Structures are given as structure tokens and as C-alpha cells.
Amino acid sequence: MNPALHLVLAIASLFAFTATSADAAIPPDFSLQTYATGLDRPVALAAAGDGSGRLFAAEIGGRVRVIRDGTVLPAPLLDISALVNTSSCGGECGLLGLAFAPDFPSSGHVFTLHNDSQRNNVILRHNIPAGSDVADPASRAVVMTIGGGSGQHNGGDLKFGPDGMLYVSVGDAAGGGAPAQDLSSLRGKILRVDVRSLPYVVPADNPFAGDSPAAGTRDEIWHYGLRNPWRMSFDRRNGELWIADVGGNGGAYEEINRAAPGAAGLNFGWYCYSGTQQVNCSLPSQTVPFVAVQTATLGCAIVGGFVFRGPVAMLRGTYLYGDYCSARVWATGTGATATPQSLFANNRPLTTFGEDEAGWVYVAEQATNARVLRLYSEHIFADGLQSTP
């Protein structure tokens, strides 16, 4: 299988992000409201899908905290601080990813991704007993260890897809970008594995499984050509995969990429392209498959979010995302002529977005006494359309 054949468009639309004065178009009762406080540098948010209404926050230092009705419980769900490396990576290492198994109500399985003392990316599985807010530490099992880490560009996200498979975002480890185009490396990739039992299994329909284009190609690879895919998500309505890739080339561009449901083997262009610019090499296609490119004038590190499927009609179907440095939240439609709107500006850097069971969207901030914020509209709550998020 020739990798050149995989340089295809994830979608047909291509448009550039520009600053707008669209804040005034957002009704004044829309805001970011504090939902929970007292977290220590949260970097991932997830719901369990068990009907409990709980939200879970992974703190970079190694704890997973339980948020119930806006209150952070004293005891963490998990504490793997002793396993997590946060000291030798310039702030880019730690506990980075969190995901609950699709069958969590019956299996109790929760998955985390962290950096170990060798700066490898390590995925663990723990079991949470039924009805408990604390995981069983004796249930810990290693799912995967991804070597070649440098402490930078970890990617570090976990999401289960509509197909029940676990998707893993992995950065290029600041390796000059070269690993991103190397199909024998797991770096600079989106991986896809079946973790319903351990050791994990490579799905037979992965694009390079059993029909590799060259000896040594890793069967776990689902997409490639990424620099530092910090956050990704699946549209809960149609299964599209959205990937926010922190930009290169001096930080000039940040990318948002989208893959159609079931699309596999896509090459998103790094390290040959950064946004619209050819950087280090050429590829057989003149078009790099990104949905959007954001210039450095609007921020420094893109934070991927979710396609909103909650109860606010004017935002439903738009993709919400942010930026770490500017601490702004934007919304954009998904069509070729969509124009992004700047919604909110926070006073602390943003690290991640989350989505609860009802499709309500949350944002976490970078601080030692950090908040989880939720998108809030007074009339939505007051009208009784959804009394709780």
C-alpha cells in the first residue's frame, strides 16, 4: 500500500481562520460560567457515560478528580502521581489523557495516558467498582507504551470512537517532524486499537494492518502526518473525527483537521507542510487536508474542542475550540463558507474542552486553583429546557 495514496482530503472544505468582530453577534446571556473550582492544572475532561452526571478531570500531576454536581470530591478517582513524570519536559509531560470505555457501566474500565520517567507515553487501564468514586489500584494494567519520547509534542489524548475502538493521539516528540511521515514510528500519528481485552488487538480494518507498504510499518496507525495533536473528538451525531494540531514553522500556523466517518490512512501533511506553507519537504499532492488554519496572531497553541450537540439551537452543529495563550473560545460552522466567531475570553490559559452525557460543553483552565467552566445561557436554564448541564 503506497503511502502517497493516503494523502487525501478529510473533507472538501478549506478555509482560513481570521479575526472577526463577531462577539457582538452572541446574545449577551451566553457566557462561560464557573462550574467547579479547586483543581490543580487540569488537562483533560471526560464523562463516564453511566448516567451518573459525573464529570472527571485529569490533573497533569497524576490525579483524576471526580466532579459531582459542580463539587470536586475530596478523594480522587485515581492517583498515579508516583508514576507520572512532570519534571523534565518543560511543562509538557504529565497525566495527559482520560477516557472511559463505551461499556463502562458493565466493565468499569477507565483509561489514562501519562509520561513515565523515560518520557514514554504510557496508557493504563483501571477498574472502578460499581457505584464507587474510587478506582481499584490493584486493577492497574499497562495497555501500551509508546517509546521515543523527548518530553515535548506528546499529543496525549484518548477517545473512544463510535466503533468502540480506542483512538490515541501521539505527537512527533519534537523530532524535527520526521517521525510524522515515518510509518515505522508511532510518533506524529493517530492510533487505533481494540482494548476490549488485553493485550490490545489491532483491528483488521486498520489501513496498514496486514498490508503494509513497507517492512516495519506499524499496524496501529490510523492517520499520520501530525505534529502535536493535542486534542481530538468525535462528533456524537455523525462520527466525524476532529483533530487540533499545534502548529510548527515558528508557531505561524495552527491546524484543525477533520476526517470523515471511517476514513483511514489520511496524511495530514506535517512535516512537509504547516498550515498553508510548505516547510521541509514536498508531497505528491498540492493540497494539504486541513479544515482550518489559524495564524499566530490569534494565539500560540490551539486547543481542540467538540462539535456542539447540546440544547442551544444557534450553536448546534458548530465546532467549539480555543487557544492556550489567548484564552479565547471560538465557534465555527462546518461548511466551506463558515466564518469563525470569537465567543469568550478567559483570564487564564485554556487547556482542554470536555463534553458531558447531554452534549453540554465545558472548558478547563491552567492554574493551581483552576476552574472548570461551562458554556452557559440563562434562558436555556431558566426556561427549564435543561435544568442541569
Image (cartoon, grey):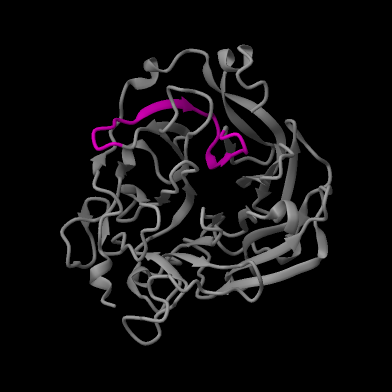
Residue 110: image quadrant is bottom right
Give the residues in magenta: 335-359
Residue 17: image quadrant is top left
Determine whether, in the image, residue 278 is placed left or right of residue 294. Answer: left
Foreground of the two, 159 or 70: 159
Residue 386: image quadrant is top right
The residue drawn where x is 53% and y is 25% is 311
Q: Is residue 380 above or below residue 304?
A: above
Q: Across the whole image, how many numbered discs are drawn on residues?
A: 0
Foreground of the two, 32 or 313: 313
Q: Is residue 117 above or below residue 317?
A: below
Question: Can residue 73 be spotted in the picture?
Answer: yes
Determine whether, in the image, residue 173 is placed left or right of residue 372. Answer: left
* Image spot of residue 139 (x, y percent): 79, 67
Q: Is residue 348 magenta?
A: yes
Foreground of the two, 214 or 31: 214
* Image spot of residue 3 (x, y percent): 28, 73
* Image spot of residue 313 (x, y percent): 46, 22
Image quadrant occupied by the C terminus = top right
Determine whether, in the image, residue 231 is placed left or right of residue 337. Answer: right
Question: Can residue 86 be spotted in the picture?
Answer: no
Q: Is residue 264 above or below residue 303?
A: below
Q: Is residue 369 magenta?
A: no
The residue drawn where x is 30% and y is 53% is 10
Image quadrant occupied by the N terminus = bottom left
Q: Residue furthest bottom?
A: 215
* Image spot of residue 118 (x, y percent): 60, 73
